[in-house]
Image: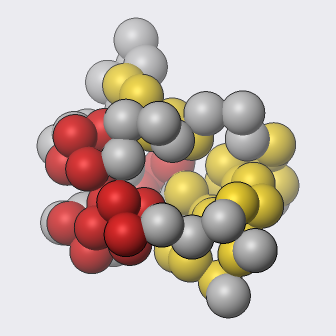
Amino acid sequence: MAKIIHQVEKCIGCGNCTVAAPDHFEMGEDGKAHLKDSEEEDGNEVKEVEVTDSLKKAANSCPVQCIKIKE
Ligand code: F3S
């Protein structure tokens, strides 16, 4: 298991993560992506998940690097 940290404030809403990992990310009405079923921690969205290739792709495809995976 790993901890996914989405730094929502940095998100510019490009949508790459929602395409790469639609099971974890969705676009919100605020124009930013949101981590599904996450909890708020220090202004970030976090959750414990099994790391998948699609999740790694989401993190790597984010232009502002606001998705962190802590294994
Ligand atoms: Fe935002 Fe990065 Fe996704 S900018 S929409 S978190 S790919």
What count of labels does the image hold? 0
Asked which colour scheme the image uses, the reply is secondary structure
Q: Nearer the viewer, residue 53 or 43?
A: 53
| Residue 54, quarter of picture | bottom left
- Residue at the location (70% across, 60% down)? 49
Q: Nearer the viewer, residue 56 or 29?
A: 56
Q: Is residue 19 left or right of residue 6?
A: left
Residue 66 visible in the picture? no
Residue 70 point in image, percent of width and height: 65, 83
Residue 36 visible in the picture? yes
Q: Is residue 67 left or right of residue 2?
A: left
Residue 32 point in image, percent of width and height: 37, 33
Q: Indicate the quadrant containing the C terminus: top left, top right, bottom left or bottom right.
A: bottom right
- Residue at the location (73% across, 41% down)? 38
- Residue at the location (37% across, 25% down)? 27
Q: Is residue 40 left or right of residue 66?
A: right
| Residue 64, quarter of picture | bottom left
Instruction: Name above or below for residue 12 compared with residue 49.
Output: above
| Residue 66, quarter of picture | bottom left
Instruction: Name above or below for residue 15 compared with residue 67.
Output: above
Instruction: Name above or below for residue 54 compared with residue 17.
Output: below
Q: Is residue 15 left or right of residue 1?
A: left
Q: Nearer the viewer, residue 11 or 60?
A: 60
Residue 34 point in image, percent of width and height: 51, 35
Q: Residue furthest top?
A: 29
Q: Indicate the quadrant containing the N terminus: top left, top right, bottom left or bottom right.
A: bottom right
Residue 60 point in image, percent of width and height: 27, 74
